Structure formats: structure tokens, C-alpha cells
Image (cartoon, coloured by chain):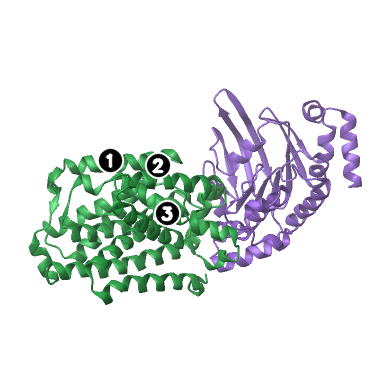
């Protein structure tokens, strides 16, 4: 509709662009690494929000798309000799394909059953890759150092991944916003509120849910490629860590599910908190327990999250905060 | 005939919910569906709009066999429904609720046109002042009207109304009855399930009575109130039936 006339989305994009170009000005690797982690979370949380926040399906194993994308990306680069850009496309496509097939199979489950099934998928993928020799089995895949030469050496390659991540963050925010302000998004939100009623009103729920799942999987697949390209190697135990999925849920719930701004704020806020906890001698070993406690508190006291709470409190914000 | 229901039966385990229900519905009429609780009225709606497939029988809508088709297919063919237990999309605004109806209904409208349709329908159904509020903030009478607004926004040929008068006070019932008559004047065919007898007698062209899934009577409101089977199964007292018909003429 008037999707481009909303000031909120331009403001969000501007803030993200300005803050992510800070490391470009200072040229400091340390700040770049901090912002890299935050942007990664922004992409993952915004993508998860499409299926969790708009459609109302809790995906507990969303990290499976990140891990699979990473594996496919590193495999195409190391064994097929493809470039990073082709690897990115391959990672995104494979995540999308997995989501499409899963969508057909498990999106007919509702509520807790769907959430359980997504955990099962993540664990099954881990077990499969652990025994899949082309992907190196339990050892995983390591990139040969020569791969980075094509991008001007390892140091330059790290900057390149950073630029690409900024681009993907912008894409993820735009995607999240466009889905939310489209007719397709209205159908998703109708499903979230009452799936049977949505069906009676004409929303083709099986298709809508599957496409929502696919859209929420593509970018995690692509940033998986970036992350593991930068990392240089990937292992099954690392790629499919369930607790990372849970951390993503905390980010979305913290910021406010079902809003565009919420997952972004949640990702920034959670990563800041995590950084603090990891460096504090008191909390460094129990930072995940803090995340769990935080999730519990949010669900009990502010289930709408920060942005949702603000929107409910001050109704004029409803139009300003997408 | 806009709708033909032929020998439709539905069983739930040991319960025969519908037994060979058969009727034709000409365009532009209002058909009342009455009967005691548990008679299978809502089940009949669920079979017509595709929530459950029937075990036997056939449903034809505008000349097309729609037996066992999904609700979203039927919604797009122009068959709308309002629910007995209201199902507002709580976290969406009232306007957005109605827009879902117009976006995914028969005309498959885009968001801009759907917003305009929603505003028209809300005006028509006296909810315009609530358009920007969340659906969860409405009271029960307003939620019933919202159900109806969503159904109307899809520009249906046939509207299934499941107890839209239940839980309303007499003044609200009078407003709603008037609304129903205006909907019919737009050329929309209606089937209504209703327990508020004087209202259903007043607006219906024809009435079907269900009891334990059986179709025990069919006819004009006058015929129904004099039908002994109906009096026994549902209306109870024959004097009550007379009183209802008088109420009908006065109202």
C-alpha cells in the first residue's frame, strides 16, 4: 500500500546503516567483529520473526538453516571451487528448499507439536551431517587458505564479508517490512490470530505458511555461508547448536514479536547483554541461564516485548513503529 | 439455485450428526435453520463451507460441485460465514480484520481497495468509529457485527450466519434484524441458524427444522409454527407457536 511512505522504516534503515558503517570509518577490526555479531543476530532474528512473529509458529530449530547454509556454502567453495557469491546463492537456495520441503511436511502441526518437530529436524540434520562423508563427517569442512587469495587475502576477505553482511541486514529488514505491510503479511497475521478463521475467510493457509517458512529460511542460509566463510571451518556440533536457536527466540521476544523494529532492537539488546555477561567474572559461565531467565520474565510480564509494549501503551506509536 | 444440498450425511464416531439432509436454496432468499441444541445445524454449516467433508451426499454451489472442497477455496468462490462463537483476530485492528475478508474473498482485492471496502462495510454495519481499535477491545455485540462485517467484505453470493443474534439485548437484536434485511436487499442469499424465534420467523422466506440430524420439517414460517412435529421437538407449546406468529405480525 503506502509501504514506502512510512517514516519508521527509513529511520530504522538509516540507523542501521550509520551504526554499521562506524567500523568502516575507524578501520578497527575489533569494533568490526562486535558489529558483525550484532548484524548477524539482526538478520537471524528478523528472519525468524517472519515465521514466529507474523505467522505465530514457534520454530525452535531455526538455526538448522544457518548451519545447512554454512555447510552448502563451504562445500561449494572448497570442493567445487565456486566463488563466495555463488556459495551465498547456493546456501540461500538450499535453506529455502529445506524450508519448502519441511513446510509441506510439518507445518500442518500446530502449537507445541510444530515447535517439537523443528527441534527434531535440527537434531536429525546434525546426526545426518555427522555421518555424511562428502561434508567431512564429524570433522567437518575446512577452507584452504588459498580460497581467500581470490578476495585479496584473508584480511581483505574479512572486510568483504562485513560489507556483504551489511547488505544482507538491509535486505532482511526490508524483507521483514515488506512482508508485514503486504497482503501476504495480512494473511499471515490472520493465521497467527486464528488459523481456522483465516481459512474460512479465504487465506490459503498451507501455501501461506510454507512461503512464510521459506522466506524466513533464505537469509539465515546466506549469512550461514558468510559466517563460516569468515570462520574458515565448520563442524556438525558447532553448526547446529540448539541453544543458539533459543537465543534467537529470546531476541525476538525481547524486542517484540510481530514488529519490524522488535527483532532488531532485541538482537542489539541481547548481544550487548551477552557481551557484558561473558566478560563479567560472575556471569561468564552462566550466561545462557540468564538468557533463559530473561525469556521466562518476558513471557510472564511483557509478552509483547519492548516494541509491542510501547505500541500498546502509546497508541499513536502504532503507526510510527512498524 | 444458488445452493443444492443432496442427501448429506455426517457421522462423528457413534453420533449420527446429519442424516440425508436435502434442500435447494434459490438466489436472494433467506433460509432459517432452526432446531434444538445438538441437532446438527452448525455441523451442516461446517459441511457446506468445507470445514468437514460429508460422509455421503453432494453439495453444489452456483452449479459447481463443491463437496469436500476446503474453506479457503469456497471463500474465494463467494461463500462467506460468520461464526457462532466469535473469532476476532484480536491483535489486529477492526479495519484489518475486515480487510482480511475483502483481501482473500471473492474479489481478491489488493490492500488499497480492501481498505476502502473495509471502511464502507464498517460504515454500513455501524462499526466505523471503532475502525482503528484492536478487535479484542470490542464488546460482544460489536464482535458479532465484526464477524458479519468480515463476511460481507468478501462480497459473497451466499452468507452463512451462525447465531448472530445470540447474546444480544432486544435493542441490539432489532438493529441486527434490520441489518440482515438490508443485506438481503443487496442480493445476498442468506442461511441463518437462529434460536431467537420471533426474529427468524420475521426475516426468513423459508425454514428448515433439524432434530437429531434429521430434517423434520421444511416450509414457510407459518407452516412451521403449525407443524406438530416441530412443536413437539422444538417449540414445545402450541400456544407459544401462535404467540410467535402474532409477534411476527406485530413486529
Residue receiving disc 2:
A115
Q: Chain of mark 1?
A: A
N-terminal of the two: label 2 or label 3? Answer: 2
The residue wearing badge 1 is A123
Q: Please rate how many residues cluster around mark 3, counting C-alpha atoms within 10 Å: few if below 14, some from 14 to 19, many from 20.
A: many
Compared with A145, A163 (above or below) is below
Q: Nearer the viewer, residue A153 or B201?
A: A153
Picture coordinates of residue A229 (x, y %)? Answer: 19, 60
Q: Position of residue A186 (x, y in %)?
A: 52, 58
SS class, disc 2? helix
**Residue B190 in the figure: left or right of residue B245:** left
The mark nearer the N terminus, 3 or 1, is 1
Any part of residue B157 in sight: no
Chain painted purple: B
Query: Where, by quadrant of the figure, is residue A312 drawn?
Result: bottom right
Q: Residue A106, how many percent across, how many down?
A: 38, 42
Pick the residue in front: A91 or A263. A263
User: What residue is drawn where x is 78% and y is 29%?
Assistant: B234
Which hue is chain A drawn in?
green
* Residue depth check, mark 3 versus mark 1: number of the one nearer the observer: 3
Circle 3 marks a residue in which chain? Answer: A
Distance (Cα) linking label 2 and label 1 = 13 Å
Sequence-earlier tag: 2 or 1: 2
Using the image as rendered, state which of residue B167 and residue A27 is in the foreground: A27
**Category of crowding for the residue at label 2, using alpha-carbon neighbours closer than 10 angstroms: few (below 14), some (14–19), many (at least 20):** some
Please say if the residues under marks 3 and 1 sit with CB atoms less than 8 Å apart: no
Residue drawn at x 22%, y 68% is A29
Question: Which disc number belongs to residue A252?
Answer: 3
Pointer 2 with pointer 1, Cβ within 8 A? no
Viewer-side label of 2, 3: 3
Residue most toward the top? B14
**One can see residue B5 in this view:** yes
Amino acid at each position: 500500500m503506502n509501504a514506502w511512505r512510512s517514516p519508521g522504516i527509513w529511520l530504522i534503515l538509516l540507523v542501521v546503516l550509520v551504526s554499521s558503517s562506524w567500523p568502516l570509518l575507524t578501520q578497527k577490526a575489533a569494533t568490526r567483529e562486535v558489529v558483525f555479531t550484532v548484524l548477524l543476530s539482526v538478520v537471524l532474528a528478523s528472519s525468524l520473526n517472519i515465521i514466529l512473529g507474523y505467522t505465530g509458529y514457534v520454530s525452535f530449530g531455526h538455526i538448522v538453516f544457518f548451519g545447512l547454509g554454512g555447510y552448502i556454502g563451504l562445500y561449494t567453495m572448497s570442493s567445487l571451487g565456486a566463488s563466495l557469491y555463488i556459495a551465498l546463492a547456493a546456501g540461500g537456495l538450499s535453506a529455502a528448499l529445506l524450508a519448502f520441503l519441511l513446510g509441506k511436511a510439518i507445518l500442518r502441526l500446530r502449537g507445541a507439536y510444530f515447535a517439537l518437530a523443528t527441534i527434531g529436524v535440527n537434531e536429525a540434520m546434525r546426526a545426518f551431517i555427522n555421518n555424511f562423508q562428502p561434508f567431512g563427517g564429524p570433522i567437518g569442512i575446512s577452507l584452504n587458505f588459498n580460497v581467500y587469495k581470490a578476495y585479496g587475502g584473508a584480511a581483505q576477505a574479512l572486510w568483504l564479508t562485513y560489507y556483504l553482511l551489511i547488505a544482507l541486514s538491509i535486505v532482511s529488514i526490508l524483507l521483514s517490512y515488506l512482508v508485514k505491510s503486504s497482503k501476504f503479511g495480512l494473511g499471515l497475521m490472520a493465521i497467527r490470530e486464528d488459523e481456522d478463521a483465516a481459512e474460512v475467510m479465504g487465506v490459503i493457509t498451507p501455501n501461506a505458511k510454507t512461503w512464510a517458512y521459506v522466506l524466513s529460511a533464505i537469509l539465515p542460509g546466506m549469512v550461514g555461508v558468510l559466517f563460516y566463510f569468515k570462520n574458515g571451518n565448520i563442524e556438525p556440533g558447532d553448526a547446529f547448536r540448539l541453544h543458539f536457536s533459543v537465543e534467537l527466540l529470546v531476541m525476538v521476544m525481547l524486542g517484540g514479536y510481530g514488529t519490524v523494529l522488535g527483532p532488531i532492537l532485541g538482537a542489539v539488546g541481547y548481544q550487548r547483554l551477552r557481551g557484558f555477561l561473558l566478560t563479567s567474572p560472575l556471569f561468564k559461565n552462566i550466561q545462557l541461564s540468564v538468557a533463559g531467565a530473561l525469556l521466562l520474565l518476558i513471557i510472564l510480564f511483557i509478552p509483547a516485548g519492548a516494541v509491542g509494549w510501547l505500541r500498546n501503551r502509546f497508541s499513536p506509536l502504532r503507526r510510527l513503529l512498524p | 439455485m444458488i445452493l443444492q444440498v443432496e442427501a448429506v450425511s455426517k457421522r462423528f464416531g457413534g453420533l449420527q450428526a446429519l442424516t440425508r439432509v436435502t434442500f435447494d436454496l434459490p438466489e436472494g432468499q433467506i433460509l432459517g435453520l432452526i432446531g434444538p441444541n445438538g441437532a446438527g445445524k452448525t455441523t451442516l454449516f461446517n459441511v457446506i463451507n468445507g470445514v468437514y467433508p460429508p460422509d455421503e451426499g453432494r453439495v453444489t454451489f452456483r452449479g459447481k460441485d463443491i463437496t469436500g472442497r476446503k474453506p479457503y477455496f469456497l471463500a474465494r468462490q463467494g461463500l462467506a460465514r460468520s461464526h457462532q462463537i466469535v473469532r476476532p483476530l484480536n491483535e489486529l485492528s477492526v479495519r484489518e480484520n475486515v480487510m482480511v475478508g475483502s483481501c482473500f474473498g471473492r474479489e481478491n482485492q489488493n490492500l488499497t481497495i480492501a481498505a476502502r471496502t473495509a471502511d464502507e462495510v464498517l460504515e454500513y454495519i455501524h462499526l466505523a468509529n471503532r475502525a482503528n481499535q484492536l478487535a479484542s477491545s470490542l464488546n460482544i455485540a460489536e464482535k458479532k457485527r465484526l464477524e458479519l462485517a468480515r463476511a460481507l467484505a468478501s462480497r459473497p453470493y451466499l452468507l452463512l450466519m451462525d447465531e448472530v443474534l445470540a447474546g444480544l439485548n432486544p435493542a441490539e437484536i432489532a438493529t441486527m434484524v434490520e441489518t440482515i434485511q438490508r443485506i438481503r436487499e443487496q442480493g445476498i442469499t442468506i442461511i441463518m441458524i437462529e434460536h431467537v424465534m420471533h426474529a427468524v420467523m420475521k426475516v426468513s422466506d423459508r425454514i428448515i427444522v433439524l432434530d437429531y440430524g434429521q430434517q423434520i420439517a421444511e416450509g414457510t414460517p407459518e407452516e412451521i409454527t403449525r407443524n406438530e412435529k416441530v412443536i413437539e421437538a422444538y417449540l414445545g407449546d402450541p400456544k407459544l407457536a401462535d404467540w410467535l406468529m402474532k409477534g411476527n405480525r406485530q413486529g
